[in-house]
Amino acid sequence: MRRLGRLGGLGRLGRLGRRRPRGARLDQPRLSRRSALRSAYEPDAFGRIAERAARFIGTARYLVAQSVVIVLWVAYNIIAPQSVRFDNFPFIFLTLVLSLQAAYAAPLILLAQNRQDDRDRANLAQDREQTIRNREDTEYLARELAAMRITIGELATRDFLRSELRGLLAELEGPDGDRAKDRDRERRRRRGGERSLRPP
């Protein structure tokens, strides 16, 4: 009889449990092939390529180059001997090439336009936020300016202070005010007399 180990029939399971899986661990979900393809596909990089292609297709250089290629293609296939021609008169291969180019150019141009629309939307959102911030700042400054005007309106002006001081001075110059003036005059005379008595 074969010995099964100290745990009996569980010995094999114990050894199997110790094996490490080749891929990811069991507590982590396995990546499907589709998700691996998605991670390799970068929409931003593809979008940049599409924009470059659309930008190049929209240039005069591309239009001139394409026209030259078509003229050379047609001229070669008309003038060349029958044995070396690769596209005879109905120019089916040329039509196929131009159709294939149009089939790829249209989606590339649409993709570039979509990216431009996304950029425009983002710029518009930033402009809106900036406009809201500017409006809030303007409203805050208007409130502060109004508060300063109210505060300045409550401050005493120079004319108001002068009129108040004149009123106080008039009150002081009443009957007691004349006596105070006489005392000041006497003091000034005495000082003047003392100065004249001093030897030079």
Image (spheres, rainbow, N blue to C red):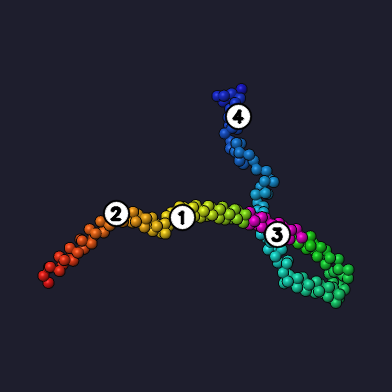
Mark 1 to mark 4 CA distance (whole Å):
91 Å
**Residue 21 visible, this angle:** no
Determine crowd level at label 4: few under 14, some 14-19, many 20+ residues with C-alpha closer than 10 A: few
Predominant secondary structure, magenta span = helix
Distance (Cα) linking label 3 and label 1: 59 Å
Which residue is depicted at the point 33% across and 54% down?
171
| Disc nearer the start of the sequence (2/3) | 3
Query: What is the magenta range?
Result: 106-125
Q: Which label lies toward us, 3 or 1? A: 1
Vertically, is 59 above or below 46?
A: below
Labels 2 and 4: the sequence-earlier one: 4
Q: Is residue 175 left or right of residue 124?
A: left
Residue bearing mark 4: 13
Pick the front one: 42 or 193: 193
Per the image, the residue denoted by label 1 is 152
Q: Which residue is mark 2?
A: 175
Q: Which amino acid type is marked by label 3?
A: Ala
